[in-house]
Amino acid sequence: MRATLIRVAPFITLVGILTVAAVALATAPSGQHPTSPVIGTLSDSTQVNADRVKLQTKDPTDVASFSVTYDPGGYSGWHTHPGVLIVVVQSGSVVREVGCGPPRTYGPGDAFV
């Protein structure tokens, strides 16, 4: 039993360190005001190829739509999304930073995935 604990201890330590690192890197949003999402489900698999856009789902898929406004100087904080996100900037500007890449600014009418 003791030998098993000794082998598991480094793994548990590594998981703990990674968890602390992830929490340390994450930042809370500030000045962010999201609307309540409207959520629907595409109940069947879907395949669409129109207007130079291809969309394919293999199973029922949830779809959500919502708006987010920010106060001047507001930000979303570091975060991820569980699926595909399509963003369209309505007014003002959005500075997007992904990983270690350079920040990119989007203005009204710009979109990104």
Image: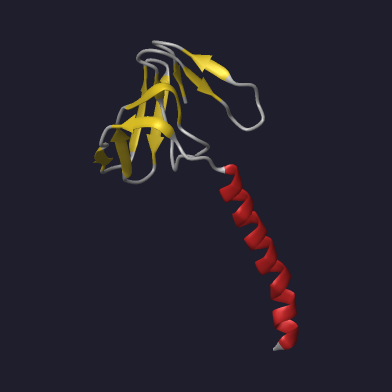
Q: Is residue 7 left or right of residue 75?
A: right
Q: Position of residue 99 (x, y in %)?
A: 62, 33
Q: Position of residue 22 (x, y in %)?
A: 59, 49
Name the residue located 64 percent from the left edge and 61 percent from the top edge: 15
Quadrant occupied by the N terminus: bottom right
- 70 lies above or below 61: above
Name the residue located 73 percent from the left edge and 69 percent from the top edge: 10
Hey, which residue is sitting farthest top in the picture?
A: 108
- 8 lies above or below 97: below
**Foreground of the two, 18 or 29:** 29
Name the residue located 65 percent from the left edge and 68 percent from the top edge: 12
**Foreground of the two, 88 or 103:** 103
Q: Position of residue 113 (x, y in %)?
A: 47, 26
**Foreground of the two, 34 or 98:** 34
Hey, which residue is sitting farthest bottom in the picture?
A: 1
The total number of labels drawn is 0
Q: Is residue 103 left or right of residue 108?
A: right
- 9 lies above or below 77: below
- 53 lies above or below 8: above
Which quadrant of the view contains residue 25? Answer: top right
Which quadrant of the view contains residue 63? Answer: top left
Q: Is residue 63 left or right of residue 56?
A: left
Q: Is residue 49 left or right of residue 6?
A: left
Which quadrant of the view contains residue 45? Answer: top left
Name the residue located 45 percent from the left edge and 11 percent from the top edge: 107
